[in-house]
Image (cartoon, rainbow, N blue to C red):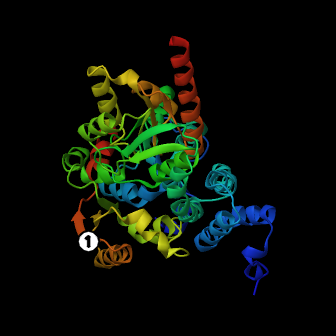
């Protein structure tokens, strides 16, 4: 038996429990994360604080270590899965308790592409950062994006592609938005393994985001700018 | 000629370029290690013995963001020695960066998005892209190296619960066979079973790889 297996989560004080949760998240221990979230709720923690401190804080470390080549895709997915477990408990409570809202995003993988691991990570981290996310799933054509933009009225459109052959479809969507005079209504963020900054610029996106953490920071910065412009115009 | 093992092609690549002395009358092929066997089979069958081959480690397939720099380094290493260098990579997930780099360096490269496409012939592969986007492709090399390129890097040996996250939207494993080898077909079928996918074998031969090499020869 290792020492870790002897830890009784409910006996840890708040500070140690938060640190333990970040460790558990790093190790992809979903059940332990769910248990710890429940413990903090019982101790009267605000759902928003549980989300931002141990969960988003823990995933930020995971993201950084992935970028630095310390963690690899399987470990990131296990951590994400653990965070998902915690978020499933917190999500309905966040709505009830009126947690701060940063903005709204519609996100989906483009037509002809079924890859959604990166997109799902972005969705989760955006939710963790206080964005409302409407996830359209995979294989979205331009009509699906337009319909969702119409009904959801988001601040941000996010598009993802994993294939060299499908990433040009992002331009089809952006060009269609431009033709309809809708392009400037949305912040358009794009991402996916074969993309790069040059491609993002070439297709007329507002930004290319190389990973979920960058997507969150970019989204925050654009939304703040949009908000400031709105204030300036008023 | 004795080829190195698949394991060696995966991790180390292969250098069959000539001695350091200028080889102006020859063509250097800088290829992905995953197509080394196919390139040698084609050049040998056609008697193109004026082509030298150097291969980068095939495992770069799993980190396409490193391919462009690796190719650039290889071209720079050999360009004083050879007048003609042909890069045997397609875009391979570099998002156009490899193409830009080759253009900057004044060398040609293979057409198409990746080896699945050029083995099948780019035009034909593109024609069924809309009906096959839920297919997962393996070539001869990738069938032989399935564990090294798919199973282990995705962590499926350690975390089988991730299977659904990786392959939940896939329906079929298409084995693009470059050669007729019943043992490889059986191995590909086994890979499909392990991934929980339907199986299809499609003989491609060398497709556009042979055509493009012929154009250089």
Task: Return the residue at label 1.
Answer: B199
Q: Position of residue A5 (x, y in %)?
A: 73, 81
Examine the rendered structure and indicate whether residue A226 appears above or below residue A189: above
Compare residues A115 and A88 and report the one nearer the observer. A88
The residue lying at 44 percent from left, 58 percent from top is B34
Q: Quadrant of residue B174?
A: bottom left
Q: Give the residue furthest to the top.
A: A233
Examine the rendered structure and indicate whether residue A75 appears above or below residue A181: below
The residue lying at 67 percent from left, 49 percent from top is A64
Compare residues B114 and A70 and report the one nearer the observer. A70
Q: Position of residue B103 (x, y in %)?
A: 45, 28
Element assignment for label 1:
strand
Q: Is residue B80 visible?
A: no
Query: How many numbered discs?
Result: 1
Compare residues B181 and B62 and report the one nearer the observer. B62
Subunit under mark 1: B
Q: Within 10 angstroms of label 1, few (less than 14), some, or many (20 or more) residues? A: some
Would residue B207 appear left or right of B71 to someone viewing this image?
A: left
**Where is the N terminus of chain A found, in terms of image quarters?**
bottom right
Examine the rendered structure and indicate whether residue B83 appears above or below residue B57: above
Q: Position of residue B43 (x, y in %)?
A: 36, 53
The residue lying at 49 percent from left, 75 percent from top is B160
Q: Quadrant of residue B57?
A: bottom right
Compare residues B32 and A121 and report the one nearer the observer. A121
Q: Is residue A89 visible?
A: yes
Would residue A218 appear left or right of A132 to someone viewing this image?
A: right
Q: Position of residue B39 (x, y in %)?
A: 38, 54
């Amino acid at each position: 038996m290792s020492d870790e297996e002897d830890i009784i989560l409910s006996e840890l004080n708040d500070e140690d429990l938060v640190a333990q949760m970040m460790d558990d998240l790093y190790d992809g221990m979903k059940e332990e994360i769910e248990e710890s979230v429940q413990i903090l709720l019982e101790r009267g923690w605000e759902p928003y604080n549980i989300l931002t401190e141990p969960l988003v804080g823990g995933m930020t470390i995971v993201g950084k270590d992935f970028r630095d080549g310390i963690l690899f895709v399987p470990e990131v997915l296990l951590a994400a899965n653990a965070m998902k477990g915690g978020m499933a408990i917190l999500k309905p409570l966040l709505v009830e308790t009126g947690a701060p809202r940063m903005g709204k995003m519609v996100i989906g993988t483009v037509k002809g592409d079924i890859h959604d691991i990166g997109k799902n990570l972005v969705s989760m981290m955006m939710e963790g950062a206080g964005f409302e996310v409407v996830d359209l799933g995979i294989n979205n054509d331009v009509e699906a994006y337009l319909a969702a933009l119409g009904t959801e009225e988001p601040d941000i459109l996010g598009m993802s592609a994993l294939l060299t052959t499908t990433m040009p479809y992002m331009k089809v969507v952006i060009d269609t938005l431009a033709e309809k005079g809708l392009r400037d209504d949305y912040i358009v963020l794009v991402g996916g393994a074969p993309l790069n900054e040059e491609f993002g610029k070439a297709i007329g996106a507002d930004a290319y985001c190389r990973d979920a953490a960058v997507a969150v920071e970019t989204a925050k910065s654009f939304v703040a700018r949009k908000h400031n412009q709105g204030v300036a115009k008023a | 000629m004795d080829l190195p093992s698949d394991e060696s092609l995966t991790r180390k690549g292969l250098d069959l370029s000539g001695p350091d002395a200028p080889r102006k009358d020859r063509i250097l092929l800088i290829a992905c290690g995953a197509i080394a066997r196919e390139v040698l089979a084609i050049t040998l069958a056609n008697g193109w013995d004026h082509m030298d081959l150097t291969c980068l480690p095939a495992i770069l397939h799993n980190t396409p963001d490193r391919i462009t720099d690796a190719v650039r380094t290889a071209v720079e290493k050999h360009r004083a020695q050879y007048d003609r260098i042909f890069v045997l990579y397609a875009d391979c997930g570099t998002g156009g960066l490899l193409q830009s780099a080759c253009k900057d360096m004044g060398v040609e490269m293979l057409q198409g998005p990746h080896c699945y496409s050029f083995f099948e012939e780019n035009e034909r592969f593109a024609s069924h892209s809309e009906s096959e986007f839920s297919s997962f492709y393996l070539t001869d090399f990738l069938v032989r190296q399935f564990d090294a390129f798919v199973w282990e890097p995705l962590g499926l040996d350690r975390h089988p619960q991730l299977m659904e996250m990786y392959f939940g939207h896939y329906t079929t494993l298409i084995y693009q066979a470059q050669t007729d080898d019943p043992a490889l077909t059986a191995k590909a079928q086994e890979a499909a079973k392990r991934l929980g996918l339907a199986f299809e074998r499609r003989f491609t031969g060398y497709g556009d790889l042979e055509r493009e090499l012929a154009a250089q020869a």
